[in-house]
Structures are given as C-alpha cells and as structure tokens.
Image (spheres, rainbow, N blue to C red):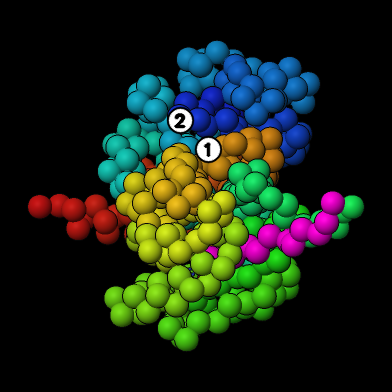
Amino acid sequence: MTVQEGLSVGVVRETGPGERRVALVPAVVGRLRAAGLRVLVEADAGAAAWFPDEAYAEQGAVVLPTAALYAEADVLVCVGRLDEAGIGRLRPGQTLVGMLAPLADPGHARLLAERGVTAVSLDGLPRTLSRAQTMDALSSQASVAGYKAVVLAASLYGRYFPMMVTAAGTERPAEVLVLGAGVAGLQAIGTARRLGAVVTAYDVRPEARAEAESVGATFLALDAVGGAAGAGGYARALTAEETEAQQRELAEHVARKDIVVSTAQLPGRRPPLLVTEEAVKGMRAGSVVVDLAASALGGNVAGSLPGRTVVTDGGVTVVGADNLPATMPGAASTAYARNVTALLLHMVADGALVVDLSEEIQAGVVVTHGGAVVHPGTAALLKEALP
Ligand code: NAD
C-alpha cells in the first residue's frame, strides 16, 4: 500500500485529433476540493467543450501553463492518452488517470511503467459491480455515442422520423434497426423512439431482449443464432457458420429498414461483421447506416471506415463513426468528469491517494505502479509478445 500526501489533481488539455472533451468540468471542482484535493487546470483545457478557464477558477481551481501543471500535479487526469510531449513531461511518482486502453496497446502501459508513473485506466473498471457504476466511463461515453448516432442518422435521412399527418398528406414513420442492444444500442433505441421512429433491435445476448423492449423496441429474434452470451455481461464471438447464417438472415431485415445503427462489439476482438456488402446493396436508395463499431480493423458494416461517410452506388449513406462522444463535448465531458471524480474519491483517503491492488475496483483500473505493469490482463499480453 502506497500513500501520497497533499494531493493535487491536474486537468490536462487533450491533444488527440478531433478531441474536444475535457476530463474534469467546473461543476465537479467543488466536490474534489471538499475532499481535500487541490484542482489545477492546464490553460484552455476545457475551451473546446465551452468550459472557459474562468469557470474553473470561479470554483476554486488554479489555472496553470502546461509546464507548471505537469510539474505541480500529483495526479494528472485526461480523457484519451497523452501525446509524446505529454508523456515526456511525466515524472516518477505521478499518477495518470484516463481512458488509456492498455489492452489495445500494452506497449503504452509498459512505457508508463518505465517512467515510474502509476497509470489508472477507467476502461478496466469491473462494470458489473453496482458500486462501480458511477465510475463507468465506457458506459457514459457509449451512451453519448448511441444518442449522437441517431441524431446523425436523422440529419442525413431525407425524410421524417415521426409519422407526419399534414394537409399535404401522410408520411409513414422511419423504420430503424439497431444492431447490438448494449449501452450505446439502448440509448440509440430510446433516442430513435423519442424522434417518433418505429424501432426494431437485435442482439445475441438473451437478456438484451427485455432491455430493448423496455426502451420501446420490437426485438428481432433470428433463427440463425441462439443465445450467445459470453463472460462479464458481454457477447461471445460467433462461429464462422453462425456468422454466415446471421449475416444472411439479417440481410433480409436490413433491406426493409430506412436506418440501421450498429453498435455490436466484442471485448478485445475486432467487431463482428453483421451487415455485408450484399446487405447494403439490398437497401433502398436514401437509407442511412451509422456504424458505431467502425474501426481500423473493420466494423459491423462492410466497408465502413472511422471518420468516413460514403454514399454507395445504390444511394445508401454509410457513416463510419469516429469518436462521436468528442462531438458532444459538453455532455460527454460532464458525464466523464463525474466518473473520474467518483473513481478519484474512491481512491483517496484523508486527502491522499491510496493504491491498494487487493481491492476489486483498483485491481481492474490500476495498470502500472511502482515501475511495473500490475494489471494482470495487460501484463499477460506483454509476456505473450516477448520473443
Ligand atoms: P459492447 O459495447 O461490448 O457490445 C454492444 C452490444 O453488441 C452488446 O449488447 C453485445 O451483446 C452485442 N453484440 C456482440 N456481438 C454481437 C453479434 N454478433 N450480433 C449482435 N449483437 C452482438 O457492450 P456494452 O454496451 O459495453 O455492454 C456490455 C454488457 O455490459 C451489457 O450486458 C451491459 O448491460 C453490461 N453492463 C453492465 C453494467 C452494470 O451491470 N452496471 C454496466 C455497463 C454495462
């Protein structure tokens, strides 16, 4: 157990491409100060999310230039990873809290360990623990993404979402299909319903049915795949035969929809391909597909690429989503700041940060400590990668 006295928390300015979020917002500064922490803010850290330096200062935070912030803070909080310059400023004994994705890039964790930094990553949180829910940044950000995916789809769709009865005639409501009814999918369903669309949802986890129905979707049950629940509340990967049968059966449903929002993910793996090129070809001109799972490794929709919107020869608009939470920086930062604050307050006792790897939440989030990679999953990946 290690104790650091007189804790100051420094909010860094994000440098990732298109990143507009900030790790702490002025509204949480008071809570941290009440717990005996000093809050330091890098100049302009919240500017892109419309939180000016003055708003932090009004809450009692101290705004500092970059070098002074890194020199003074005991704990640095960020959203995405620091860039090379930021990492170069870290000093041994400092703590870094953010969404550091150690399982996607264990080499980065090793780098932080070598610098003597205690790295804490919110994406390692044990999500099924109810006392960790307020710290669940994966959920808070997925929820923003699910909402924004539908708003994007609605703005690209050339027709109404709700049924419209006007003197000029009646328009039928849009038919929306949400693939993957996890956190993002459920928020997408609710948002599309609030806009007046008729919503169908599909997932391979059996418990997703009741959850999707509770937010207003009709659940689509496929003959192709039975229940495919995996560990920790996630789905398991399907076999090649199941995948092919799923794609074939889904294509018939996709063809009848105006909007498809796909959100299916598998922990630590590339996202499953649910909508094939053939299925996109089967959609009507004017239809819109938003793939929240788009990644460099592929997404749920054939050909979708993060940050790219294409209109197919058949007139279907396919949006590869790329960090949608960053496009709603006010809401996403506010939720993230609450998650970070809850985690910090969980780790702080008597105004000091207490690292205790025997505690369940910390065992999930603490990636490096005392010069070593202590997170078992990340350490195992590093060991595997050794020649
Ligand atoms: P996720 O982002 O990993 O995946 C999104 C959805 O895609 C999941 O519902 C998954 O079942 C689905 N999916 C995966 N492969 C699929 C396929 N081939 N076809 C169709 N759907 C597929 O999931 P998430 O949103 O992070 O949520 C994962 C789980 O964690 C859910 O059960 C969620 O309820 C749970 N969760 C629990 C808590 C809690 O208990 N406090 C908090 C957050 C999340």
**Some atom of ligand 1 lies within 8 Å of the CB belonging to the residue at label 2:** no
Residue 11: quadrant of the picture: top right
Query: Does 171 appear in magenta?
Result: yes
Give the vertical position of 222 relative to 200 (above or below).
Answer: below
Q: Quadrant of residue 348?
A: top right
Q: Which residue position holds label 1?
A: 79
Q: What is the distance, in whole Å, between disc 1 and disc 2 at their CAs?
A: 9 Å
Residue that sits furthest to the left in the current view: 387
Q: Report crowding for label 1: few under 14, some 14 to 19, many 20 or more residues within 10 A (C-alpha).
A: many
Give 227 or 102, whichever is nearer the viewer: 227
Count every numbered label the image shows and give the total: 2
Check if mark 1's residue and mark 2's residue have beta carbons within 8 Å.
yes
Q: Residue placed farthest to the right in the image?
A: 167
Q: Report x, y in % for residue 74.
A: 52, 30
Percent x, y of residue 90: 40, 27
Q: Where residue 230 sits in the image (x, y, percent)?
A: 44, 76
Residue at the spot x=38%, y=64% of the render? 278
The answer to which of marks 1 and 2 sits earlier in the sequence is 2
In what element is the residue under mark 1? loop
